[in-house]
Image (cartoon, coloured by chain):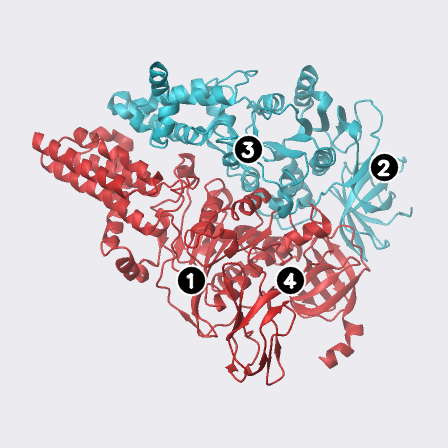
Chain colours: A cyan, B red
């Protein structure tokens, strides 16, 4: 392989090389340092005069004397069955002291878009055992549902609880987990690893670790390696894969860093204008393919800078993903776990996975009613702060109490408490029964007669 | 043509000089703006978007990874065009009219590159029935025959760019879209297919004023903020506020004859939902599957960005083609913000001087050119047809002051403002009744008088007044609580709540409530008005607000939404209300 020593400029993670042979866009590049060590990069811009290479690691040690080797191919990921149970670096190299991965296939890490016509419809209900997800923001197989959190909130616990408890009722298959850490601390990484080991989840997991002190630019490829692995497990081996990506905020920061180094025209808050397309290239790799057995369900986690949901990172994510689970600082301060605020949370695919044949016929209506009642009660809290409880009408007082009950009984649950969907829905009915029946305007009479505790008991008594 | 063919060798093939993502530069090629070119050894499809001396800048519709400088570039000399003819309906295309089903056959479940596929099936035979005779004069837009495509009759037109003349021969029978079905005296031969460049609007005889509403079966839209057939509307809203559901409801239930749905840079799973749902749903008018009147364009967010830019033009050209047959077409674009972002992405790769928030300076011009292709028109063939355009807008952070929303609002006539607060409260459709507007109310007034009821317009104004009043009262309630309000205003609050919960809220997932015709809308609103009138009368007669608010029969009103044959049930509720209030009044 020809080696060039024609570097003209090094700026941030970018290396400019001239007088090369024709080089392909997106090609993988090896950079040979004076001590013989090799760094990797990718071609970002190519012309007959100048080639711009983005280096995945730090550029420390790269100089005009470094050699450049173009590999002639785009970045490929070796994948194989024996990846399960392994821990790899953010760049895809084993770091658990085990042997190299025996590749069964080498796949392009960019991944091709699933043809919308070939997509299968996601409609298998996943029971996570968490009421605020199963009951009011239901997850289905093939969905991408991010967790919007903030610094210092227990999003990692929630992600782990989901990874541990997620199952499709009636199906014996466990999920394989692909876990990609981007820029998280060693401590956080250990927390995940220990839990995986303790519960035995590691056996069916592939872990990619790019820690806080690893090169930021490497974060650009970490999620792509993880998803390429997930696609192999799902669509070649027929497994149901749960992909956890944390923390997407760090990924976006890396994206901004490269944009700035390339002197691109920045979009909102300095993030590149193509961030939407770039994120879509990651999130859209969730899904089901018609006629194939496996599936990819994604749980990206991101911390909203300043808890601001309109910040470009959560904003663009929300426009691509099928809903979001919002973790609330207020509930966390009240000591409620999991502090999921259902009001801004949403699952767009919920309606595909609930109702008769999936969960229970009353699911949709119960969920709507819980939402509406909690929203109303929550609004009244502001009013109470001004006029006091006594100035409220009787109806208002009931809704106010409902909001407290909802948080304390429906939202709050144990870290290892695994509620079935029936338990969640019955709990919902019990809470709703504290309101007068005529206030349940979102539920039709038939369902009220069948499931409302009051009528259920009379029906039983008569029966 | 002859002359051009001679110098093909010297000018039609050049070489690549530079590749930077979806934008590449070629030299040694003669090209015109928007010529379609084939890039590299794999012949990826691209389009000339800038000419700079020697350098021809091309946007490529497919992934350019691995393409090197020095690879060939071929100019086709044609601009980006769509194939128009029988076979469009029920199709699902990517942004450059490649049928996605054909792509699955050719390259599997994932989108690979370098595969071309014509928009129409060129081997399928269609039964053609001529409607003109030999010796008859025809001109651009004349219907020369028809094909029963689905339950929709596909009219075959003389293309707008054909001069016309006398029919020399015409034949009936079963033909492919390539076979000549008709010849004219000047030697022109016509097939069932025509090609049209997507960036050029198809010509019409004249544009007319819209006077008929596009009925959508959505109460807040038809009732309060209607769009006219041939009109334009924008639905801006933050994520999760229900843009896509609203767009899909419109695609399902609007009373247009043809629906073109563009999924522009949106979610793959959503397109799957449309694909699985539409063939099963029935058109409320014809009882046939909705898919039979639909053309879908799906260029999801992870498909190439240049094709996303083109998808909107592909869609509107297909819409115009059906309009030219004399149909009412509605076009949904979800989302125009993704389209604008595609423009921004390409503009920034061209290193153009950016305008506001990095969008190109020509953003406003492109948006207005697009919306201006809507309209109710007299076609070249003298028929009446229309294209209504409904564009979703996805403002970052839900901030309506951003450039795409603002430039859109300057053009469109109807504004349906989605509101995240409403959707969090599960008030769907989450359209804010105070911020939304329709500028078609005046021109549609006559239609509502005639087709619904002479009372409707005043009933609408009454409802809007109550809602406006409620917003003012809510500010007071926030401070002092509802019990402190004067009696009459407590009733106003209750009536407003009924309008919101009974009339405005509509369940898209309920088999009955998903579509509500104008008659039912009118009946529902009238029942609420009746309660209101009775309540104020009772209050004047000295009945207390507590008694008025606890009238039991009104609690049955929300159930009307879910009943198909609602008339007897509604009549009973109205009679019950009447007698309950009578009892209250006589007791007072």
Closer to viewer: mark 2 or mark 4? 4
Dot 4: within a 10 Å radius of its alpha carbon, few (fewer than 14), some, or many (20 or more) residues? few
Which residue, given by chain and number where applicable, does mark 1 sit on?
B230
Q: Chain of mark 1?
A: B
Q: Are marks 3 and 1 in contact (CB under 8 Å)?
A: no
Looking at this view, name the residue that lies furthest to the front.
B173
Q: Nearer the viewer, residue B188 or A244?
A: B188
Q: Chain of mark 4?
A: B
Which residue, given by chain and number where applicable, does mark 3 sit on?
A304
- The percent coordinates of residue B198 (x first, y second) are 58, 65
Q: Nearer the viewer, residue B360 or B192?
A: B192
Closer to viewer: mark 4 or mark 1? 4
Above/below status of B130 relative to B118: below
Which residue, given by chain and number where applicable, does mark 2 sit on?
A38
Dot 2: within a 10 Å radius of its alpha carbon, few (fewer than 14), some, or many (20 or more) residues? some
Question: For the point 31% across and 22% down, which residue is it?
Answer: A398
Q: CA distance from mark 2 to mark 4?
A: 57 Å
Nearer-N-terminus badge (4/1):
4
Looking at this view, name the residue that lies furthest to the right.
A1
Q: Chain of mark 2?
A: A
Q: CA distance from mark 1 to mark 2?
A: 63 Å
Tell me if B546 is positioned left or right of A264 in this view.
left
Q: Chain of mark 3?
A: A
């Amino acid at each position: 392989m020809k080696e060039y020593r024609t570097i003209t400029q090094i700026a941030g993670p970018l290396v400019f090389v001239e007088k090369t042979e024709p080089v392909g866009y997106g090609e993988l590049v090896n950079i040979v340092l004076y001590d013989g060590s090799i760094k990797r990069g990718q071609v970002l811009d190519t012309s007959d005069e100048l080639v711009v290479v983005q280096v995945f690691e730090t550029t420390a040690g790269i100089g005009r004397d470094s050699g450049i080797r173009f590999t002639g191919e785009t970045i490929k990921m070796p994948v194989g069955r024996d990846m399960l149970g392994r821990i790899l670096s953010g760049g895809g190299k084993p770091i658990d002291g085990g042997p190299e991965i025996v590749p069964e296939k080498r796949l392009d890490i960019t991944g091709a878009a699933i043809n919308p016509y070939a997509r299968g419809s996601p409609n298998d209900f996943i029971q996570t055992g968490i009421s605020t997800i199963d009951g009011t923001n239901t997850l289905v197989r093939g969905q991408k549902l991010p967790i919007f959190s903030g610094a210092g909130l227990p999003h990692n616990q929630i992600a782990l609880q989901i990874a541990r408890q997620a199952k499709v009722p009636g199906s014996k298959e466990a999920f394989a987990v692909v876990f990609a850490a981007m820029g998280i601390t060693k401590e956080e990484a250990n927390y995940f690893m220990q839990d995986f080991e303790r519960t035995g989840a590691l056996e069916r997991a592939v872990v990619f670790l790019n820690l806080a002190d690893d090169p930021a630019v490497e974060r650009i490829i970490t999620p792509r390696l993880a998803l390429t692995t997930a696609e192999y497990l799902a669509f070649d081996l027929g497994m149901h894969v749960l992909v956890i990506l944390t923390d997407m905020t760090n990924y976006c920061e890396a994206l901004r860093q490269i944009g700035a180094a390339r002197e691109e025209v920045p979009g909102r808050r300095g993030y590149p204008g193509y961030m939407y397309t770039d994120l879509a290239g990651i999130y859209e790799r969730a899904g089901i393919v018609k006629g194939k057995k496996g599936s990819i369900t994604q749980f990206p986690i991101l911390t909203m800078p300043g808890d601001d949901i309109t910040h470009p990172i959560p904003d663009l994510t929300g426009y691509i993903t099928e809903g979001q689970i919002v973790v609330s600082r207020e509930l966390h301060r009240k000591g409620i776990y999991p502090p999921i605020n259902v009001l801004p949370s949403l699952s767009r695919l919920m309606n595909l996975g609930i109702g008769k044949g999936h969960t229970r016929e009353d699911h949709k209506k119960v969920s709507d009613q819980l939402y509406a009642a909690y929203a109303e009660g929550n609004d009244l809290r502001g009013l109470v702060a001004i006029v006091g409880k006594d100035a409220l009408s009787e109806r208002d007082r009931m809704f106010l109490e409902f909001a407290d009950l909802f948080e304390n009984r429906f939202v709050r649950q144990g870290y290892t408490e695994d509620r079935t969907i029936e338990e969640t829905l019955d709990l919902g009915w019990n809470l709703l029964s504290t309101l007068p029946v005529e206030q349940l305007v979102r539920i039709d009479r038939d369902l009220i007669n069948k499931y409302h505790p009051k009528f259920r008991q009379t029906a039983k008594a008569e029966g | 043509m002859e002359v051009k063919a001679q110098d093909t060798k010297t000018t039609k093939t050049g070489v690549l000089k530079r590749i930077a993502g979806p934008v590449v530069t070629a030299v040694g090629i003669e090209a015109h703006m928007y010529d379609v070119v084939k890039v590299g050894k794999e012949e990826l499809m691209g389009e000339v978007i800038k000419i700079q001396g020697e350098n021809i800048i091309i946007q490529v519709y497919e992934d350019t990874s691995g393409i090197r400088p020095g690879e060939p570039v071929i100019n086709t000399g044609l601009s980006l065009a769509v194939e128009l003819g029988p076979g469009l309906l029920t199709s699902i295309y990517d942004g450059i009219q490649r049928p996605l089903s054909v792509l699955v056959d050719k390259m599997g479940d994932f989108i690979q590159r370098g595969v071309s596929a014509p928009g129409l099936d060129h081997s399928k035979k269609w039964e053609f029935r001529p409607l003109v005779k030999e010796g008859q004069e025809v001109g651009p837009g004349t219907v020369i025959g028809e094909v029963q495509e689905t339950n929709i009759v596909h009219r075959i037109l003389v293309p707008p760019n054909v001069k016309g003349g006398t029919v020399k021969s015409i034949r009936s029978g079963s033909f492919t879209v390539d076979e000549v079905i008709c010849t004219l005296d000047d030697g022109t031969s016509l097939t069932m297919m025509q090609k049209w460049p997507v960036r050029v609007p198809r010509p019409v005889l004249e544009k007319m004023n819209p006077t008929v509403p596009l009925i959508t079966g959505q109460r807040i839209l038809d009732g309060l903020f209607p769009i006219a057939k041939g009109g334009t509307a924008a639905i801006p809203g933050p994520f999760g506020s229900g843009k896509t559901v609203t767009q899909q409801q419109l695609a399902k239930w609007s009373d247009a004859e043809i629906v073109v749905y563009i999924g522009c840079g949106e979610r793959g799973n959503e397109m799957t939902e449309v694909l699985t749902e539409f063939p099963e749903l029935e058109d409320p008018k014809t009882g046939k599957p909705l898919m039979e009147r639909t053309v879908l364009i799906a260029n999801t967010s992870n498909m190439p960005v240049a094709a996303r830019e083109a998808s909107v033009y592909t869609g509107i050209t297909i819409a115009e083609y059906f309009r030219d047959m004399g149909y009412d077409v509605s076009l949904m674009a979800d989302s125009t913000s993704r389209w604008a972002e595609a423009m921004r992405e390409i503009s920034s790769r061209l290193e153009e001087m950016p305008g506001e928030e990095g969008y190109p300076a020509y953003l406003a011009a492109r948006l207005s050119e697009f919306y201006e292709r809507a309209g109710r028109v007299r076609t070249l063939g003298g028929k009446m047809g229309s294209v209504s355009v409904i564009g979703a807008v996805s403002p970052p952070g839900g901030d309506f002051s951003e450039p795409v929303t603002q430039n859109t609002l300057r053009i469109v006539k109807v504004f349906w403002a989605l509101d995240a607060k409403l959707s969090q409260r599960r008030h769907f459709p989450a359209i804010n009744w105070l911020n939304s507007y329709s500028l078609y109310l005046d021109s549609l007034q006559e239609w509502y008088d005639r087709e619904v009821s002479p009372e409707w317009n005043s009933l609408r104004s009454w409802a809007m007044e109550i809602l406006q009043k409620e917003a003012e009262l809510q500010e007071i309630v926030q401070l002092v609580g509802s019990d402190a309000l004067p009696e009459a205003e407590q009733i106003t609050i209750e009536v407003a709540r009924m309008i919101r919960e009974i009339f405005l809220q509509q369940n898209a997932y309920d088999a009955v409530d998903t579509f509500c015709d104008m008659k039912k809308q009118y009946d529902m609103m009238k029942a609420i008005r009746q309660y209101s009138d009775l309540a104020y009368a009772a209050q004047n007669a000295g009945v207390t607000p507590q008694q008025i608010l606890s009238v039991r029969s009104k609690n049955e009103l929300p159930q009307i939404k879910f009943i198909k044959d609602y008339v007897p049930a509604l009549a009973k509720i109205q009679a019950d209300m009447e007698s309950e209030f009578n009892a209250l009044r006589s007791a007072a």
